[in-house]
């Protein structure tokens, strides 16, 4: 019987800004840290190693590592499965249902336990620096970044930080990528600096320059064919089995179930951060932005994300 997913969400505030996160890792980091993501599907596990690039996206890499070290991703799942990407980091499964993970509330809880998280800051008119709890978009469409001479692009196996459409939040505000506020103050769209925990692995065969300009590629599967492809092969094999089973009902013959009108990663807190310009973010705060997702009928769970090299 096809699982029916539903979304449970609640507004929440987030944790305080940690300005010492970068310093904590100074002297013990490499340009290419590595992480191992363990996926489980249909009773089997698949370990996939990724090599990250600090030169391409230093803030994004550090943010991802900190979330991984805090155990944030453990037990989350792939909520959207397409022909070119597997999206994760925003949902969990419980009792056969899909639940949005409240990023801001969870980060606040983890910081109270002693974790710290790299994040961008918003500069008010009085020069007050306010933590955004999000990571700056390190890609060319976001002002102040370039894609030239990058180590990784949107090729098969790319690990990419994802952010959802914020619509009315495409308004200029002063955002600094450096949590210490030491980089040049640049007026940037909040929507492009609102990434939280969402990420995807790009599985498309063709390179995608358009996506390179819009999302930050911050890593690459170390052995795509040897480690990631077996997961895809298992999914294809499962799907083929459904189609070949004469007793399988027609609505069960697809690996994914379309779920409409889901609000993902829209648990924004712009009202408390932007009280002076909050009206420009009304659609995000009140109405939210909805999307349709291709949710796997059989869960693809992210069992763990472990940093194996800093």
Image: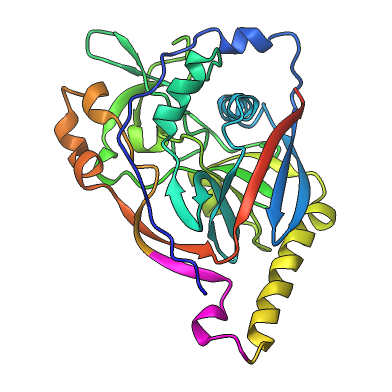
The single residue placed furthest to the bottom in the displayed view is 246
The residue under the point 34% across, 32% down is: 190
Relative vertical location of residue 237 with respect to residue 137 in this rendering, above or below: below
Relative vertical location of residue 224 with respect to residue 217 in this rendering, above or below: below
Instruction: Give the number of callouts.
Output: 0
Residue 260 position, x and y percent, is 36, 64
The single residue placed furthest to the front in the displayed view is 95
Q: Nearer the viewer, residue 46 or 27?
A: 46
- The quarter holding residue 202 reads bottom right
In magenta stretch: residue 306: no
- The quarter holding residue 42 reads bottom right
Residue 213 position, x and y percent, is 51, 45
Q: Which residues are magenta?
A: 247-259
Which image quadrant: the C terminus?
top right
Residue 86 position, x and y percent, is 59, 55
Relative vertical location of residue 261 with respect to residue 185 in this rendering, above or below: below
In this picture, residue 124 sits left or right of residue 105: left
Q: Nearer the viewer, residue 255 or 310?
A: 255
- The quarter holding residue 172 reads top left
The residue under the point 46% across, 22% down is: 109
The residue under the point 26% across, 35% down is: 171
Relative vertical location of residue 125 with respect to residue 232 in this rendering, above or below: above
Question: Can residue 244 be spotted in the picture?
Answer: yes
The residue under the point 50% across, 50% down is: 94
Tell me which colouring the rendered structure shows: rainbow
């Amino acid at each position: 019987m096809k699982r029916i997913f539903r979304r449970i969400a609640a507004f929440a505030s987030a944790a305080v800004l940690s300005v010492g996160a970068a310093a904590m890792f100074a002297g013990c980091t490499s340009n290419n840290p590595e992480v191992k993501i363990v996926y489980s599907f249909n009773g089997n596990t698949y370990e996939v190693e990724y090599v990250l690039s600090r030169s391409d996206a230093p803030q994004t890499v550090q943010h991802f590592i900190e979330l991984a070290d805090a155990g944030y991703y453990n037990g989350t799942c792939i909520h959207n499965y397409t022909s070119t990407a597997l999206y994760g980091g925003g949902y969990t499964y419980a009792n056969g249902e899909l639940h949005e993970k409240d990023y801001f509330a969870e980060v606040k809880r983890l910081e109270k336990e002693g974790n710290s998280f790299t994040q961008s800051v918003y500069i008010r008119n009085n020069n007050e620096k306010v933590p955004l709890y999000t990571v700056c978009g390190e890609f060319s469409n976001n002002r102040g970044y370039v894609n030239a001479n990058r180590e990784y692009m949107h090729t098969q196996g790319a690990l990419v930080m994802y952010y959802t459409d914020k619509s009315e939040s495409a308004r200029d505000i002063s955002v600094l990528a450096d949590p210490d506020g030491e980089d040049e103050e640049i007026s940037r769209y909040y929507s492009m600096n609102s990434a939280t925990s969402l990420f995807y692995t790009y599985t498309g065969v063709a390179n995608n320059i358009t996506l390179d300009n819009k999302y930050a590629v911050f890593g690459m599967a170390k052995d795509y064919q040897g480690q990631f492809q077996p997961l895809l092969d298992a999914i294809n094999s499962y799907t083929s089995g459904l189609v070949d089973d004469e007793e399988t009902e027609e609505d069960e013959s697809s690996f994914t179930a379309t779920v409409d009108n889901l609000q993902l990663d829209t648990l924004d807190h712009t009202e408390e951060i932007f009280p002076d310009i909050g009206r420009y973010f009304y659609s995000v705060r009140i109405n939210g932005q909805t999307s349709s997702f291709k949710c796997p009928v059989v869960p693809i769970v992210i069992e763990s994300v472990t940093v194996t090299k800093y």
